Amino acid sequence: MELVTTLDHVEAPDRLTLRLVLKHPYYPTLMELAQVRPLRFASPQAKPGEPAGTGPWMRVDSRLGEYDRFARNPLYWGPTPAYGEVLVKVIPDPNSRALALQTGELQLIQGAAGEITASTFVRLRDQGFATALSAPLATRSVAMNTGRGATRDLAVRQAINQAVNKQAIIDKILYGLEPRADTLFAPNMPYADLGLEPYAYDPALAARELDAAGWRLAPGNTVRSKGGEPLSIELVFLGTSALQKSLAEVLQGELAKAGMHIELRAVEEGALVRRQRDGDFGMIFADTWGAPYDPHSFVSSMRYAGHADYMAQRGLPIKDQLDQRIGQVLASTDEQQRAEHYRFILTTLHRQAVYLPISYLTAISVRRDSVAHVQFGRTLFDVPFETMTPQQEH
Amino acid sequence: MLRYILLRLVLLVPVMLGVSLLVFVLLHLGSTDPALDYLRLSHIPPTDAAIAEVRHALGLDRPLYAQYLSWLWKALQLDFGTSYLTGRPVFDDLLYYLPATLQLGGLALACTLLLSIPLGLVAARWQGRWPDHAVRAVTFLGVSMPNFWLAFLLIALFSLWLGWLPPLGRGGAGHLVMPVLAIALMSMSINARLLRASLLEASGQRHVTYARARGLPARQVWGSHVLRNAWLPLVTATGMHIGELIGGALVIETIFAWPGVGRFAVSAVLNRDFPVMQCFTLLLTGLLMVCNLVVDVCYAWLDPRSRLEGVSA
């Protein structure tokens, strides 16, 4: 949220006007003010820690670790929600969530795909529960380190993009629930519908390009090498994530077929952040942040050491120019100019094959028949309860 | 006896100090940086400036011994810091969640004792006959089945198919049945098998044969000569089960969305929430030591030989 550092001061000239004075133009200002956890401008009379807002619901009751109860906000400016109350329960285990839905303890599970596993989603769908998937909201991707090891070589990064059968991964591991990703951001994200040519799955082409770049497979060897350096890359993943482990193993198998040795490194979440920060990886799982942060906040972070993306990109010969364009796009007030800056940034990242986009993350929804008109919000975290209506369960 | 209890209570102090030091050092020797964990959990980008600021704010820029002494001094005043994840005082949170875990663990312990003793007695009394076979089959399943798997089977049976019990959460008595069963089954099975073996061993002793030869009624032989000796291994095992039951609660609370310390601690471990992990480990150590003390006192009461050894120690 760069608005915090961009904000110079705030004025309240009259009762109904709030004026934000920025140090320089910053186009995502309104978007950042509209986030789920926005920057708050509190009156001196406001009580710290007390929820405040203008949305359709008010929190009326909470039990730590058990539930939050929301009631209709009588002062809400929009249409009155059909439900009088929403009870959000804390259920940490994904399998327990599914069972709670099956028993009728819950009427709805909605949110990021991890709320329940992909196989559970398919099972519930097959059992007749109403299910839905949102449009792409973020990207599941792997960042490649352009400043270290074999991935310094553009040919290697491009070959990785060509040698992985993403559709097989989606079909076998993700149960076909996530659309295939060919670019860092889905075309439905702002400024991201650029018609970039995908790296098609073509292991033969990957092998030819590696040969041409000098990464050759010596007779009797299974791993390519160049000037005595074996084509070995360390892939860092979150050890507690069964999904990342499966994805890492498939990537290892796919790339082995092209003569690349992938060394899998499972780490804890804290260690993963440290490796991202220090650039201590060959490849690392690094999903985009999703709407409403994509593309502006995500792209903005690429300029700062401490982010995996900065560390992944630091070996690019045009990294300075890229960072400069990112600064320009955020300060740009001209729509056409902004689109042009984004075209440059996203095209460069795509052609330089800094990322291996795998699939687009979507929100999931599974509901009982007793709830109708379930819709998705604009982000992975929004659940528009106000549009839902009760109906007779079959 | 009083001297023995006092001695054991005094011994609590060095053990707690040792555990606190060990946990502190182990957590800080890990591959991760508490400052990075703090920033990650607070959703703040880990820039150099942010890390330096957090290190200073959390006192991580001081030597390790100074950090430990500072933590210890505060801990003695029951100030275990604030959780990186929730931002609330750790001790307050643990005290908030503790009653739910004690309820679950206490009932599981009661269930273990109430079920295992009759099962063990029945199996030993009718050794080699169908009640023995039935008990052995049930306890064989009990010791073999992981508690999380049993938990899901119970939910599927009693909530999904039969609709008799609520599947999760904390509320009335119905909410307790499945988590307590899932936690207690393994301890109950071990205890029942142990008691059976212990009873059979004791009933083969010479003094029992003499008691029978003296013409004592079977009830008196079992009550005064067999059971009295067979209890002892059960008391020791029960002491060990207390740790198992609390360990079981860590998993079971997550499955049943039970708002207890176990679930809170699992979340802290997964998120490397250092202050919570430190406080939880100490709390658990203290709890287990007190429970072991109670078990040892029971043992001493039941067996005068150990009482004398304890006093002489």
Image (spheres, helix red, strand yellow):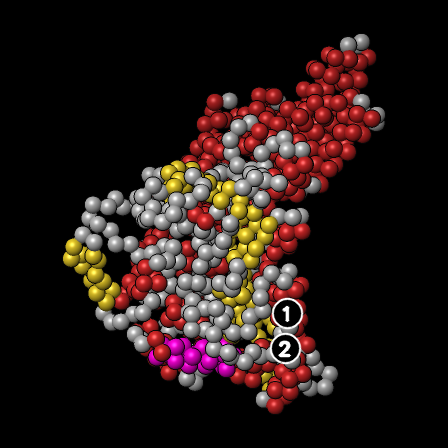
Q: Residue at x 48, y 42 (%)?
A: A89
Residue most toward the left? A13
Residue A167, visible in the rendered structure: yes
Residue B208 location (% of width, % of height): 77, 18
Is residue A147 placed above or below B265 in the rendered structure?
below
> Which amino acid, by three-letter code, is at mark 1?
Gln
Q: Residue at x 37, y 73 (%)?
A: A303
Magenta highlight on residue A233: no
Q: Which mark is residue A201?
A: 2
Query: Magenta stretch?
Result: A337-354
Q: Secondary structure at mark 2?
A: loop
Task: Say whether residue A300 is left or right of residue A268.
Answer: left
Q: Nearer the viewer, residue B239 or A275?
A: A275
Q: Secondary structure at mark 1?
A: helix
Q: Residue at x 41, y 64 (%)?
A: A293
Q: Which residue is mark 1?
A: A167
Residue A302 location (% of width, % of height): 40, 72
